Image (cartoon, rainbow, N blue to C red):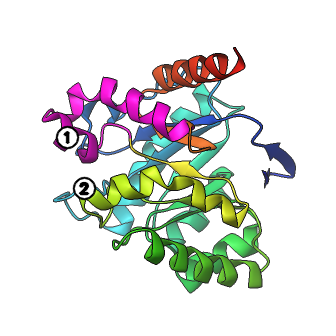
Amino acid sequence: MSVNIGGKLHCFNKTEVMAIVNFTPDSFFQGSRYNMEVPSGVFCIDFGAYSTRPGAEEVSESEEIKRIDENLPILISKYPDAVFSVDTFRPSVAKMCIEKYGVNIINDISGGCDEMFNVVAEHKVPYILMYSGGGGLPEMMYFFSKQIDALTRLGVNDIILDPGFGFGKTLEENYDIARNLHVLHTFELPILVGISRKSMIQKVLQTSASESLNGTSVLHTMLLDEGVDVLRVHDAKEAMETIKLHTYYHKL
């Protein structure tokens, strides 16, 4: 499987790492707030200026743009050759990031709308389609079928699927989807997961986000067995080590 990023075909021959950088003062994991240190070897740097954690403060569109304008140039100057993804559900913000900063990928937690789909189609950038609802596997598969059809009708073929762990799902639904993630291969599209330090780990281990790195690595290993293509993470170095060990183990 592959996606076209800026005219270059990126093939997912192995599991890749997407590093999270938050331009927010209230992201659920404190270590990701304004932390612009990213190790080499990541597939993409995913930045966001609007915290989507439960109970987070509402951020206006102008404030989201202001945070991006203040911080993204610094990040680009540090990593000029990196692939950048913007984590936003606002079509206007996505459009600005593409046109002003040359951002390569749109990561939309909302699951999409006509306006966002049109922005992606117009600019021919890959789109991360998230299922942020609940209900389990049947609902997720129906949602993806419907939205993929809408996107392809507009000419958008570079789609990455995200099951949306932690968004609108019970603990049991999160783990049921994780155990059966391989069913998403039916769509023949890359699969991205974001479980890094989330409550689905904290609740089982009865721990906090700051203490959930070990649990994250364990769950990443299980998801690698399901054929995940991209891990969206706070701890890129540790995720890459997990992938390396998992790959070596299965070569023996």
Q: How far apart are marks 2 and 1 (CA)?
A: 9 Å
Residue found at x 80% / y 51%: 6
Give the main secondary structure of the magenta stretch.
helix
Amino acid marked by disc 1:
Val
For the magenta stretch, what is the residue range?
Answer: 196-224
Residue found at x 27% / y 37%: 29
Q: For residue 189, what is the image quadrant?
A: bottom right
Q: Does the magenta stretch include residue 140?
A: no
Secondary structure beneath disc 1? helix
Amino acid marked by disc 2:
Leu
Identify the residue position indicated by label 1 in the image.
Answer: 204
Which is nearer the eye, 61 or 222? 222
Q: For residue 171, what is the image quadrant?
A: bottom left
Marker disc for residue 16: none
Furthest residue in direction front, as rendered: 252
Identify the residue position indicated by label 2 in the image.
Answer: 171
Residues at discs 2 and 1 in contact (Cβ within 8 Å)? yes
Residue 35 at least partly seen? no
Residue found at x 64% / y 54%: 105
Total numbered badges shown on the rendered structure = 2
Secondary structure beneath disc 2? helix
Q: For residue 66, what is the image quadrant?
A: bottom left
- Is residue 141 positioned above or below 198 on the image? below
